[in-house]
Amino acid sequence: MKRSDVERYRRGTAEYVVMHARWAASRGRRPSLSFFLQANPQKALAWAESMAYFPPSGSYLGGGTPEHYVCAECGASGCKLWRPYNSFDIHLLCAVCAGKDQKKGTSTIDERGTILSELGHNQRSDQIGWYIPAVPTEDEGMEAYWGYTSVPNAGCDWWAALPSLPPTPEKEAVAA
């Protein structure tokens, strides 16, 4: 195992701790990292192993976007989408359509998919009203989405890499 295999993951994540332990073991060493508040490396590794998520294909969703990942209102795809919080009626919307649905302004959206919070103090949120980021699971043949606090790091990174806004007709014309 190479050190670069470990460095693919962000320091401090469960995946980094697990991969670092595997790398150390390949060199005849014991785990040496803490994880969150667990300073004991063996206990930290056990905890990290229970939380770590490694995509089956090596990259989340194989690096692509599922066919069903489309805005239900405008048909936009290839961009970040949001879904209703705590609902079994999955209705995916792009930032623009979610803003309209929730009567929230999205003009302050940034590349991370966050908008200025109504609470002020320059705080940002990835929620648009009652809509939260829609991160699909990798379950074959299912249109399932991770719970807001359960998304693995690989899923967060996948969602963060998508453009925050749907392509506009002007951008599509320039790209063609």
Image: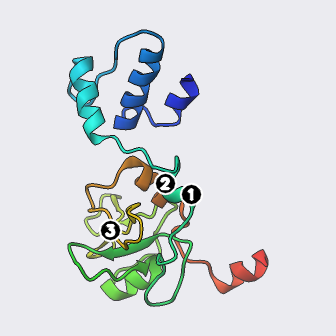
Three-letter code, disc 3: Gln
Element type at marker 3? loop
Instruction: Look at the image and tell me in which quarter the N terminus lies.
Output: top right
| Cα distance in 3D space between marks 1 and 3 | 24 Å
* Residue designated by label 2: 60
Residue at the (46%, 49%) spot, across then down:
56
User: How many marks can you see?
Assistant: 3
Three-letter code, disc 1: Gly
* Drawn side of residue 89 relative to residue 162, left or right: left
Mark 2 and mark 1 in contact (Cβ < 8 Å)?
yes
Q: Choose the circle earlier in sequence order: 3 or 2.
A: 2
How packed mark 2 is, by other alpha carbons closer than 10 Å (few <14, some 14-19, many 20 or more), is many
Task: In the displayed orientation, state which residue is furthest to the bottom.
Answer: 73
* Residue designated by label 3: 127
Residue at the (23%, 32%) spot, across then down:
47
Q: Answer with the quarter of the image where residue 64 lies.
A: bottom right
Element type at marker 1? helix
